[in-house]
Image (cartoon, helix red, strand yellow):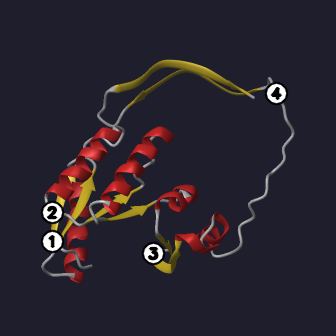
């Protein structure tokens, strides 16, 4: 892993022991490949705010990182926020000559943002190909190890039927605060 500045970036979630352990392994892996590499780490604390992700990427690159690795960066983003993130990534790659590695299972996003795609299965590299030679069927087959059928499944329409009812649900968020309090809803097909 060669970089012009010998610096790569890592974005972690909350600054917790489990994330610090991952950071140690990430840095060890980078140094195994290049003993002189510097790993810059930023803790986002909140992955639900797209502005925070943009801020983290900008901060890492301003510290000299040439490579940014994003793991499921669109998991909690709306389609509009995903488009905004992809515009930032295109600018980083196209205008600033940076490298962005995106780890995702969302095939349409892979095809929309990448130049080259690598597929791993069970921790091993299955293959790499230029995105222009890929499509969802090829990538899915590489991911699963056998042909995946992408045909429409037909089901009987049952409009107006209640499929799910939830009453008075309560739940705490990851910080121990009430996130849901007495929420009720029903899902009608």
Circle nearer the N terminus (1, 3): 1
The local crowd at label 3, few if under 14, some if 14 to 19, many if 20 or more residues have their Cα within 10 Å, is: few
- Residue 150 visible within the image: yes
Which residue is at 54% across, 61% downward? 111
Which residue is at 85% across, 35% downward? 157
- Residue at which label 1 appears: 5
Helix, strand or loop at mark 3: loop
Circle nearer the N terminus (4, 1): 1
The local crowd at label 2, few if under 14, some if 14 to 19, many if 20 or more residues have their Cα within 10 Å, is: some
Q: Are marks 2 and 4 in contact (CB under 8 Å)?
A: no
CA gap between label 4 and label 1 equals: 59 Å
Residue nearest the observer in this picture, 161 or 150: 150
CA gap between label 1 and label 3 equals: 29 Å
Which residue is at 51% across, 19% downward? 183
Q: Is residue 117 above or below residue 167?
A: below
The local crowd at label 1, few if under 14, some if 14 to 19, many if 20 or more residues have their Cα within 10 Å, is: few
Circle nearer the N terminus (2, 4): 2
Q: Is residue 25 above or below residue 48?
A: below
- Residue at which label 3 appears: 123
Helix, strand or loop at mark 2: loop
CA gap between label 2 and label 1 equals: 6 Å
Residue nearest the observer in this picture, 6 or 161: 6
- Residue at which label 2 appears: 64
Residue nearest the observer in this picture, 185 or 149: 149
The local crowd at label 4, few if under 14, some if 14 to 19, many if 20 or more residues have their Cα within 10 Å, is: few
- Of marks 1 and 3, the one in the foreground: 1
Which residue is at 29% across, 34% downward? 175
Circle nearer the N terminus (3, 2): 2
């Amino acid at each position: 892993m060669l970089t012009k500045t010998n610096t790569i970036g890592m974005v972690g979630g909350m600054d917790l022991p489990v994330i610090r352990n991952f950071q140690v392994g990430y840095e060890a892996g980078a140094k195994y490949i290049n003993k002189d590499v510097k790993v810059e780490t930023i803790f986002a604390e909140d992955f639900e705010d797209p502005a925070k992700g943009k801020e983290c990427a900008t901060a890492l690159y301003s510290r000299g990182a040439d490579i940014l690795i994003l793991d499921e960066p669109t998991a909690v983003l709306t389609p509009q926020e995903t488009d905004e993130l992809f515009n930032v990534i295109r600018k980083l790659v196209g205008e600033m000559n940076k490298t962005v590695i995106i780890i995702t299972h969302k095939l349409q996003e892979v095809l929309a943002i990448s130049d080259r795609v690598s597929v791993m299965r069970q921790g091993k590299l299955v293959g790499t190909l230029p995105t222009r030679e890929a499509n969802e069927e090829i990538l899915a087959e590489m991911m699963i190890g056998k042909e995946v059928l992408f045909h429409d499944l037909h089901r009987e329409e049952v409009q107006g039927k209640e499929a799910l009812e939830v009453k008075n649900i309560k739940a705490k968020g990851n910080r121990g605060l009430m996130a849901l309090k007495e929420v009720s809803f029903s899902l009608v097909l």
